[in-house]
Image (tube, rainbow, N blue to C red):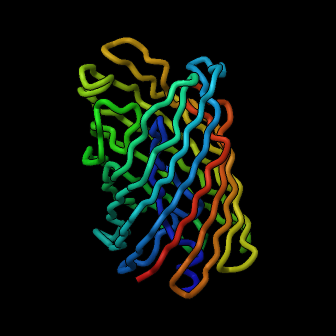
Amino acid sequence: MKTLIRALPFTALGLLSPTAFGAEADPGDYIAAPPGTDLGLLYFQHSSADTYRDASGKKVEGSNRFRSDIGILRYVHFMEVLGYTIDPQVVLPFGYLHDARLGGSSIDGNSGVGDVQLTSTVWLVNNPAQRRWFGISPFVVAPIGTYDKHESFNLGENRWKGILQGGFVQGFGERYSWDLIGDVTWYGTNTQAGGGDQTLKQDRSYQVINWFSYHPSPNSRIAIGYSHTWGGEQRLDGERNGSKTRVDQWRALYATSVTARDQVQVSLARDLNVQGGFERDYQLNLRLAHVF
């Protein structure tokens, strides 16, 4: 059990922001647990932004800010099908988007539940002896979340999304590991955008995440990471609205086991080189995981 808990495999969803990204990933997400393992997870994220940048990356003048407090419930079950390990799972976000201003004008927030995610990783490489794993994760995001067509920010997006993510993990010796994760997101059409009478369409977006980890003990991890997201330009009734998904972000993370079945993880991130959205000054993530 101690070997399992030190590398709990989760693929954290794109934690909600004014511009939703693809499926997020922490180090160790693409390490497969033994079939029959069940995981229950609770996430909390607080993010704060005081800068908004236009599609060219120029800072928008005036008072700009955005705050969000998001929780996530997640259940994961590992099983074996035709000789491959898979992990069917369901993810439900909930929370509060608030304290928003853009160019000095207040923007109403929103609270409730987000769009549910259904996914499962299929491990094509699962080699613990060589500390090497590779998996593919298709996501379906169903538009059941809270959505008010008259609000600028919502927890739900009122559109279907599809995400395809792949992740590779390689260990080096006993104390180091490298995670490389990439994904592409396809966006459905929101026909109740812009106050409810416009159509929102969005180009595909892409993300690449690198994590390098040091393991000071068999049950703990210290990691630094870097994410690059691009694409996702939006159009309202065919006209560009200035929003897209260009963000670079650095990250730092610490995880440790507190019991044989429980793990605590905390991470901190900051946005860099944002175009077409809010630039987060910091993003604090907490995660509690329990093995059943």
In front of the other: 268 or 180: 268
Viewer-proximal residue, 277 or 14? 277
Q: How many marks?
A: 0
| Image position of 223 (left or right of 134) | right
Q: How far from the left and from the top, in percent, is residue 252?
A: 70, 56
- Which residue is at 55% across, 73% downward? 128
Of residues 202 and 199, the one nearer the viewer is: 199
The answer to whether 234 is drawn above or below residue 50 in the figure is above
Q: Is residue 100 above or below residue 182?
A: above
Which residue is at the far top? 239
Rendering coords of residue 63 (x, y %): 62, 27
For the question of whether residue 32 can be seen, the reply is yes
Q: Residue at x 51, y 31 (%)?
A: 245
Above or below residue 171? Residue 136 is above
Residue 57 visible in this rendered orientation of the protein: no
Residue 19 placement (x, y as % from top left): 47, 35
Picture residue at 40% right of the left edge, 83% below the top: 292
Q: Residue at x 39, y 55 (%)?
A: 94
Q: Quadrant of residue 119?
A: bottom left
Left or right relative to 244: residue 164: left
Q: Position of residue 289 (x, y in %)?
A: 49, 73
- Give residue 271's quadrant in the image: top right
89 to 192, vertically: above or below: below
Pick the front one: 228 or 151: 151
Left or right, 63 with respect to 8, comes to right
